């Protein structure tokens, strides 16, 4: 019995020792501390993190910085308006371009008239030269007859004397007595002068209106442009560009709108702005389209509600020759032309068209275009013109 009790006690002691061993946890191995994670370098910074690693040195406050002075908002540069060239003497300055015509007209005539013998054949050649220069048959015959008489009476063969006689006859054929001034002065009752510009497509009509605006600006006139060619948006854009270059406003309407309405609005705007002159550009009418010519007449009638139109300028291409005369007749019947503008007169031997068109219409050539430059539109001066032709 005693043996049994001793065995039981021994088993109990062993069990207690084993249980204690199982309950006590094992001691874990200690790992070295992890290096600090750097926001913005080791991971994307979050809320509360700095984007960069904090500096060891203290940062400066805002007051420590030298701040640049505060400036106002930048102003857009003002576009510089062009200043057109003076009009006085412009034709003389452009003589070199005009003198390109002298190879056929001027030099040809002088060569013929400088021959030792001026027989019938020579005078016929003189007539042919003038006719080829578009002087016209009747004016040519009259000019040659006068010149033959003067040469025969004087009995001269001196080239300089013959040249002087030829110059006098050519100037006389250009009718220097005609009034070539442009009526562009503001009326005493406060209404601006009105200039209506007409012509067929391709003559340089819209460009002429822009150049004429420059002529008037150079004379210190206040100008308003009316883009009544509503059939071509490009024409209105082109005219607006011409006006913007010299600070002249342009009144325009919707594409395909009523040209007479645009012309009326331009006159109204010019009156309200107390402008000196209103220049109205029109569509390039085809002279064989009666309906279009009637519409051009309507534009003129609408403008005349405020008073008479001061100028109706017909733009002709000098290189078209006798076709220009046909155009001149039709336009004159439709709108009563008061003056001619001859364009593209540089580099052509058709300078005689000046004589023919004046004789046909009985109205003067008032302006001539001698190139593509912005200031190549010049008042027509018969003496300077002839001098350029004869060199």
Image (spheres, helix red, strand yellow):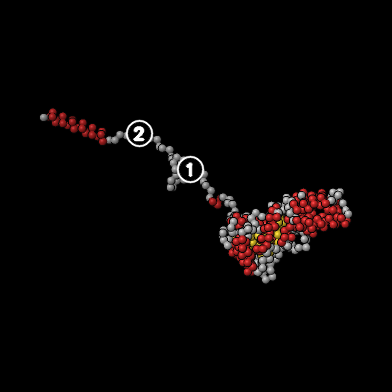
Q: Residue at x 43, y 46 (%)?
A: 46
Q: Residue 350 shows which numbered tag?
A: none
On the rendered structure, is 17 left or right of 156? left
Relative horizontal placement of residue 327, taking residue 382 as reference (left or right) = left
Farthest residue in the left direction?
1
Numbered label attached to residue 53: 1
- Please tell me how many numbered marks the rendered image carries: 2
Q: Residue at x 75, y 56 (%)?
A: 137
Residue 36 is drawn in which quadrant? top left
Crowd tier of the residue under label 2, counting other residues whose Cα lies within 10 Å: few below 14, some 14–19, many 20 or above: few
> Vertically, is 117 above or below 270?
above
The residue most toward the right is 155
Q: Position of residue 295 (x, y in %)?
A: 60, 62
| Residue 22 placement (x, y as % from top left) | 25, 34
Q: Residue at x 70, y 59 (%)?
A: 340
Compare marks 1 and 2 and give the one earlier in the sequence: 2
Quadrant placement of the N terminus: top left
Q: Which mark is residue 29?
A: 2
Viewer-closest of 79 and 277: 277
Using residue 210 as the reference point, say whether residue 138 is left or right of it.
right
Q: Is residue 104 visible?
A: yes
How far is disc 1 from disc 2 in space, using C-alphas? 32 Å
Question: Where is residue 298 shown, x and y percent of the image?
Answer: 61, 65
Q: Are marks 1 and 2 in contact (CB under 8 Å)?
A: no
Q: Residue visible at 44% across and 44% down?
A: 45
Give the camera-side residue of 54 and 276.
276
């Amino acid at each position: 019995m005693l043996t049994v009790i001793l065995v039981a006690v021994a088993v109990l002691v062993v069990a207690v020792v084993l249980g204690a061993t199982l309950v006590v946890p094992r001691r874990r191995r200690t790992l070295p501390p992890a290096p600090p994670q750097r926001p913005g370098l080791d991971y994307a910074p979050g809320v509360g993190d700095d984007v960069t690693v904090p500096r060891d040195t203290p940062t400066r406050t805002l007051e420590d910085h030298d701040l640049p002075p505060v400036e106002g908002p930048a102003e857009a540069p003002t576009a510089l308006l062009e200043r057109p060239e003076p009009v006085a003497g412009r034709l003389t300055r452009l003589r070199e371009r005009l003198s390109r015509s002298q190879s056929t007209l001027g030099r040809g005539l002088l060569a013929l008239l400088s021959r030792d013998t001026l027989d019938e054949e020579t005078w016929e050649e003189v007539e042919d030269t003038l006719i080829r220069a578009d002087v016209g048959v009747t004016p040519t015959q009259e000019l040659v007859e006068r010149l033959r008489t003067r040469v025969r009476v004087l009995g001269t063969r001196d080239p300089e004397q013959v040249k002087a006689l030829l110059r006098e006859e050519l100037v006389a054929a250009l009718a220097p007595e005609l009034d070539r001034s442009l009526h562009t002065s503001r009326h005493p009752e406060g209404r601006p002068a009105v200039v209506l510009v007409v012509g067929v497509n391709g003559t340089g009509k819209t460009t002429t209106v822009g150049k004429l605006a420059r002529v008037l600006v150079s004379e210190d006139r206040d100008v308003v442009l009316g883009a009544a060619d509503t059939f071509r948006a490009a024409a209105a854009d082109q005219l607006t560009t011409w006006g913007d270059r010299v600070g002249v406003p342009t009144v325009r309407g919707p594409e395909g709108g009523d040209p007479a309405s645009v012309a009326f609005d331009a006159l109204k705007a010019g009156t309200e702005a107390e402008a000196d002159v209103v220049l109205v550009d029109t569509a390039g009418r085809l002279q064989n389209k009666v309906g279009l010519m009637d519409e051009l007449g309507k534009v003129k009638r609408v403008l005349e509600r405020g008073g008479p139109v001061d100028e109706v300028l017909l733009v002709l291409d000098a290189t078209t020759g006798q076709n220009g005369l046909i155009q001149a007749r039709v336009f004159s019947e439709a709108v009563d032309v008061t003056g001619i503008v001859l364009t593209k007169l540089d580099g052509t031997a058709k300078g005689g068209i000046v004589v023919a068109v004046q004789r046909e219409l009985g109205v003067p050539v008032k302006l001539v275009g001698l190139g593509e430059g912005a200031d190549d539109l010049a008042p027509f001066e018969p003496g300077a013109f002839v001098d350029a032709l004869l060199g």
